[in-house]
Amino acid sequence: MMGNGYKWIAAERESLDPYVDYEKIWKLSTCYYVNDFMMNFLYTTGFPHFILPPHGGEVTYRDNTGKLIKQQDKREADTAKHFWRWFEYGPSDPITQKSIKQVNAIHQGIANKYPGRFSNLEDFTYTMCWIGADMHRLRLRVGLSGYTDKQKIATHLYWQEIAKLFRGENDAPIIDFPASFDGMLEYMEKYEAIDYPYTEAGAKACEAILEQFANRWFPKGTRFLGRLMILSLLDEPPHRVHRLPYPNVLIRKMMEFGFAAVVYTQEKILPDPKLSTPEKHRRAATKKNSRQVTAA
């Protein structure tokens, strides 16, 4: 899809019926402003939340053999590929359904080696709630407006349908997805309020995640800025459970202001992108393949 007009995304999104067009609203909310840097940012801020329970760090770290540890960029890229498929096509599309089936198979393969670790279905529900609703919380925290009413309805319906495709250990269906967007926020708060114990595996997994983000996007000599950015924009639960240090207040405020300024500039000042990020990926791949054929 290609948009028309200088600022077209919000207008088109708000013209839709969220009860019918929730997949399109989610796509408009994510696939245009979110670039590869922002997707990596979501991955990096998300995983410390997803592994709050001790078994999360255990199956991610896997005694220093996990893909997140040994193949940091590939782990992020593989996750991003799945996210882009889900975000672009939505739960009704066979492309998304095939992608989630693959993820379910990966989880079951790990569960075969770590029995019981994927039987906590609330972990799945929390992860989906976080991916759907945490950006709303972060926007409010840095002084931006949160999701619109239509975005809230669409987000809830979109992830409610995604949840029907996921399976826990031994093909267990997800049955506790919240009944509303506010319910998603409440679910996240309750899950995050649990007094999870610190584990070395969880802390080391978090360090690998921070390292991947800083190494990929920041040149040598400036990588500490990438780490400070993530530590500043992470909320309280990962800091508490994984004992991640807080930057000082001035740095946190600077990072929050910088994040808010970038998002505001994208949404209110610069022209909206005409192409989605997945479409840009496809065009770049086609161009690269064409050059390779010509060179051959």
Image: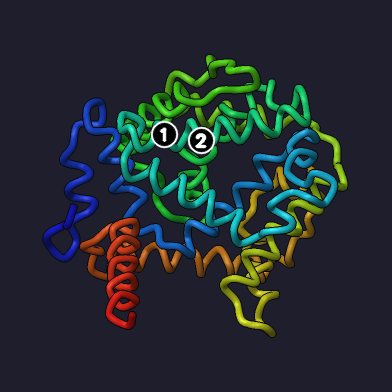
Look at 30% across and 63% down and name the residue there: 280
Q: Is residue 91 above or below residue 135?
A: above
Query: Left or right: 102 with respect to 245?
Result: left
Give the residue number, with chain letter if any, for mark 1. Answer: 98
Query: Quadrant location of residue 98?
Result: top left
Measured as percent of width and height from the top left, residue 152 is found at 37, 34
Q: Are marks 2 and 1 in contact (CB under 8 Å)?
A: yes
Give the residue number, with chain letter if any, for mark 2. Answer: 102
Residue extending farthest front: 296
Look at 45% across and 21% down and name the residue there: 164
Residue extending farthest left: 4
Q: Would you call the spot at circle 2 few (<14 residues within 10 Å), some (14-19), or many (20 or more)?
A: few
Query: Left or right: 88 with respect to 234?
Result: left
Look at 74% across and 67% down and name the residue there: 248
Measured as percent of width and height from the top left, residue 33 is found at 35, 59
Three-letter amino acid code at disc 2? Gln
Q: Nearer the viewer, residue 98 or 184?
A: 98
**Marks 2/1: CA–CA distance:** 6 Å
Measured as percent of width and height from the top left, residue 261 is found at 43, 68
Query: Quadrant location of residue 213?
Result: bottom right
Three-letter amino acid code at disc 1? Lys
Query: Quadrant location of residue 246?
Result: bottom right
Q: Would you call the spot at circle 1 few (<14 residues within 10 Å), some (14-19), or many (20 or more)?
A: some
Look at 17% across and 57% down and name the residue there: 2
Element class at badge 1: helix
